[in-house]
Amino acid sequence: MHIWRLVEETWFSSTFKNRLLHHFGAIAESENQIGKAN
């Protein structure tokens, strides 16, 4: 079992998830701004 590979994959996947959440959060926020403007 390659522990470092496991750690690496877990870290990268969690970073990727955080990026996706941040990305979608920013999209939702910008949509809210547009909705308020209209």
Image (spheres, rainbow, N blue to C red):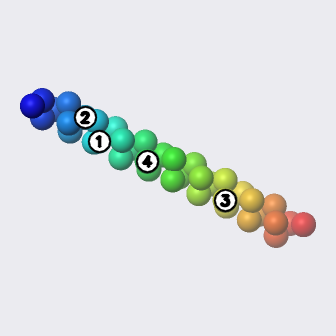
Which labelled disc corresponds to residue 19? Answer: none
26, 14: nearer the viewer:
14
Q: Is residue 31 left or right of residue 20?
A: right
CB of mark 1 within 8 Å of CB of mark 4? no
Percent position of residue 4, x then y? 16, 32
Mark with earlier residue (1, 3): 1
Q: Quick one: which residue is furthest to the front in this view?
A: 1
Q: Quadrant of residue 35?
A: bottom right
- Determine which quarter of the picture holds residue 38: bottom right
- Residue 8's tag is 2
The tally of labels here is 4
Q: Secondary structure at mark 2?
A: helix
Q: CA distance from mark 3 to mark 4?
A: 16 Å
* Amino acid type at image mark 1: Trp
Three-letter amino acid code at the position of disc 4: Lys
Give me the C-alpha separation between circle 1 and circle 3.
Answer: 26 Å
Which residue reaches farthest right?
38
Please name the amino acid that badge 3 sits on: Ala
Verify CB contact (< 8 Å) between mark 2 and mark 1.
Answer: yes
